[in-house]
Image: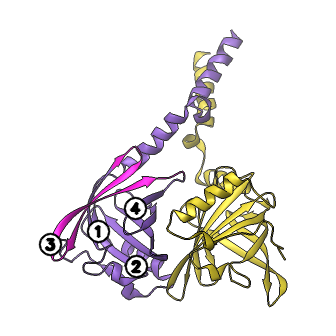
Chain colours: A purple, B yellow
Amino acid sequence: MKLLLLSMGLALVCGLQPECSRSEEDLSDEKERKWEQLSRHWHTVVLASSDRSLIEEEGPFRNFIQNITVESGNLNGFFLTRKNGQCIPLYLTAFKTEEARQFKLNYYGTNDVYYGSSKPNEYAKFIFYNYHDGKVNVVANLFGRTPNLSNEIKKRFEEDFMNRGFRRENILDISEVDHC
Amino acid sequence: MKLLLLSMGLALVCGLQPECSRSEEDLSDEKERKWEQLSRHWHTVVLASSDRSLIEEEGPFRNFIQNITVESGNLNGFFLTRKNGQCIPLYLTAFKTEEARQFKLNYYGTNDVYYGSSKPNEYAKFIFYNYHDGKVNVVANLFGRTPNLSNEIKKRFEEDFMNRGFRRENILDISEVDHC
């Protein structure tokens, strides 16, 4: 009888122990479900860049997120952007990589994209390292579930960017601006 | 008797279920122990940069790793570097951040440092995004547990870097070079 109980216990325990029984696919499914929380509607609240022209009017990174959908771990972003005074849709896909939170995006050259957020139901931070014509620039996007975010979140985003040695004028709060 | 067994089973199961009983410190201890695998002896095998001068003779990022120690999740790197023809020690500390695999380093301006490796007993890849005088540069370091690495690993590192639009001459294999 003891043996039975022990084996039952072990089976129970092993059944719950992630490494024991969960196949590679289960674990990667779990990772993909984790990214689901990023989907649905978003607003671009603040943009910041080492090169201000990238995020100014008609700049390649002055794009207004509308929503994100997640497909096998890749992030599909639907943006609106203004080109020659016209509002046009822009669809970008950031492909997952071997490393968690890191994606690859082919747009205006190539980009390493890193995601970070401690409150995905409230805000999401996407840092783009853009490689274009042999040059490197950083573009930081602060997205909110609402058109604006608390001053506390915006201030932390700003400080984090200025700690990299950039000036405040390279940070554009576009929460009140006409988003196309 | 049944109740006893059940509670024993639950205690056993709960004891193994990470979320059940493990406090915040336990989980962060576990994260820190994960970084322990990065400690001990390393060799710099390949350096690559968007700005080649940063990794050429006397360049600020032409540093030869000797070893890494891990302290409360921060990475202490001991390097040798050549300044004015002299070999001198260089100690750098990359401080952990809220995000896994991402560290902050104050050296030649400020740096976001990202770690990535699928075989930490064999090689480690550290990508530095360096911010200096308002400019951004990327410096990629390929460390090996041995003075040289397989062509397969070096080729993947090279391709990964060139996929960002940089030229081969911005990649320096220093496995055969005199490391101070």
> Residue A41, position in %: x, y?
26, 56
Magenta residues: mostly which secondary structure? Answer: strand
Whether the residues at callouts 1 and 3 have beta carbons within 8 Å, the answer is no
Q: Quadrant of residue A88?
A: bottom left
Q: Residue at x 83, y 83 (%)?
A: B88
Whether the residues at callouts 2 and 3 have beta carbons within 8 Å, the answer is no
Same chain letter for marks 4 and 2: yes
Q: Which residues are magenta?
A: A70-98
Q: Earlier in the sequence, mark 1 or mark 2?
A: 1
Disc 3 is placed on an element classified as strand
Residue sitting farthest toward the top? A1
Cα gap from disc 2 to disc 3, whole angstroms:
23 Å
- Tag 2 subunit: A
Cα gap from disc 4 to disc 2, whole angstroms:
18 Å
Same chain letter for marks 4 and 3: yes
Q: Is residue A97 magenta?
A: yes
Q: How many marks?
A: 4
Q: Who is closer to the viewer here, A163 or A103?
A: A103
Question: Where does label 1 land, which residue?
Answer: A44
Q: Which label was assigned to residue A106? A: 4
Disc 2 is placed on an element classified as strand
Question: Which amino acid, mark 4?
Answer: Asn
Question: Where does label 2 land, which residue?
Answer: A49
Question: Where does label 3 land, which residue?
Answer: A86
Number of residues whose C-alpha sits closer than 10 Å to that of mark 1, classed few (under 14), some (14–19) or many (20 or more): many
Q: Earlier in the sequence, mark 1 or mark 4?
A: 1
Q: Quadrant of the C terminus of chain A?
A: bottom left
- Up-down: is A19 above or below A57? above
Q: Earlier in the sequence, mark 4 or mark 2?
A: 2
- Up-down: is B78 above or below B87? above
Whether the residues at callouts 4 and 3 have beta carbons within 8 Å, the answer is no
